[in-house]
Amino acid sequence: MNISRRSVLGATMLGGLALAGCTSAGSTTAGSTAGTGSQAASTYMVAKKTGQLLVGFSNSFAGNAYRAQMILELKEQAKKQASDIKDVIVTDANGSVDKQLSDINDLVTKGVDILMIDAASSTALNTAVERAQKAGILVVSFDNTITSTAGIAVNVDQKKFGQIGGDWLATKLKKGDTIFTLDGASGSPVNDDRLSGAATVLKAAGISIVAGAPTDWDQAKGQSATNDLLAAHPDVAGIYSQGGGPSLGAINAIEARNGKVVPITGEGYNGFLKKWKQLKDASGWESIAPSNPPSLAADALKVAVKAVRGEDPGQTVMIDLPVITQATLEQYVRMDLPDAFFLPTSLSEDTIAANYKK
C-alpha cells in the first residue's frame, strides 16, 4: 500500500468519523463508567449506549465455507439479541488491506455503533481503528485480530491451537522424523500463530519441518499442495495441517497414490471428521482437531453488546478452545451434513436445515 493511498484513506476516515458521531443508531450516555474503571481511562471502551445498535462487520474475505458459516453464526446471534441489535451490515474485503480500510470507512460513515473486524492484517488497520474508537465506536476484532489496544480482541488461543496439534503429532512420531506443514492464509495472524505454536513443540521433540505450503485452509488447495510436497519429500512421517479442509485434501491425495495415511492433525471441518471416523472404524487411525469454530463470531458479538452497554470485558477476551479427540469424535461428527460445515456450532437445527440440508 503506497503512501498516497494511505493519506487519502486517512483523510476520508476523518470525514466519515465526524459523520458517524452524529448518526449512530444507539444513543450515548455521558459520563458512564464500565466494569473495571472509567471509560476515560480505557483505550478501548466507549461511552455507554442505549437503544438498538447498528453493527458493522468488516470481513477480510468471505471466499470459503468457514467464512460463510461465520456470517450465518453472526446473523443468527444478532436475531437472538434483536432487542439490542437493529441491523448487521457485512462487507467483504476480498483479501485486500486497502479494500478493508475502505470498508471500515464506509461502515463508520453509515453510523455503526459496533465495528467488528476479522482482519486482513494485524497492524495495517490500527490507525483506522484508533480513529473509530475516538469517535465513540466500539471496535471488536476476532479470529484474525488487530494489535491496537483501541479495540477489544476476542479469540481462541491460536498459538495453543498449534501447540496442541504439534504435541499430539510429536507423540505419534520419533526424534529425527520429518514432516511438512499445510498452512492457512500466508501472512495472516491466525496462520502465523498456529504455525509458530506447532513448530516450537515439534522442534523441541527433535522433529524437523522440511517444507510447507499455504492452502488458505481450503481442501482442494490442501490436496494439491500435498501432491507437490510428497513428490519432493516422499518419506515424511507425518503432516501438520492447521485446517480440516487441507487435512481431508491430504488424506485424499495419499489415498489416490495408494499410500499409507500418516498421522495428520486436523480441525473441526465436518468432511475431515467424517473421513476420520471412517478410517478410525476401519483401521483405528487416529487424529486430533483443536477447533476455532465459526461461532466465534457469535461470541464476539455477545462481548461487544455487553461492552457497549457499559460492561468492561477487558481488552483481550479468550474463548475456550474446543478440542475434538479420538474419544470425543462421535460427539461432534455430523454424518447427516455436508463436508463444508464446521463443528462445534451455535447454529439452531432450523438454520442448519435451511442452509445445509437442501
Image (spheres, rainbow, N blue to C red):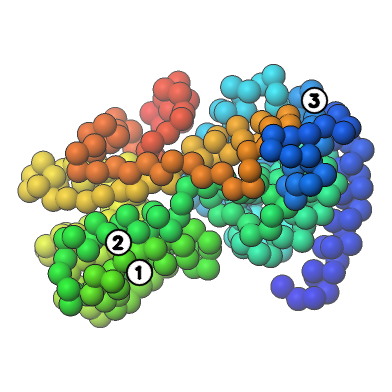
Question: Disc 2 on helix, strand or loop?
Answer: helix
Q: Which mark is residue 166?
A: 2
Q: Nearer the viewer, residue 348 or 337?
A: 348
How far is the residue under mark 3 from the one under mark 1? 47 Å
The amino acid type found where label 3 is placed reads Thr
Q: Position of residue 124 (x, y in %)?
A: 69, 65
Q: Residue at x 25, y 80 (%)?
A: 232
The reply to whether discs 1 and 2 touch (Cβ–Cβ < 8 Å) is yes
Closer to the chain start, of discs 3 and 1, is: 3
110 sits left or right of 261 in the view = right
Judging depth in this view, the residue of 153 and 245 nearest the camera is 153
Label 2 with label 3: CB-CB less than 8 Å: no
Specify whether 281 is left or right of 249.
Answer: left
Q: Residue 324's x, y, as percent?
A: 29, 42
Q: Residues within 10 Å of mark 1 (few under 14, many from 20)?
A: many
How crowded pointer 3 is (Cα within 10 Å; few <14, some 14-19, many 20+) is rated as: some
Q: Which quadrant: the C terminus? A: top left
What kind of element bears circle 1? helix
Q: Of helix, strand and loop, which one carries label 3?
A: strand
Q: Is residue 14 visible?
A: yes
Q: Quadrant of residue 32?
A: top right
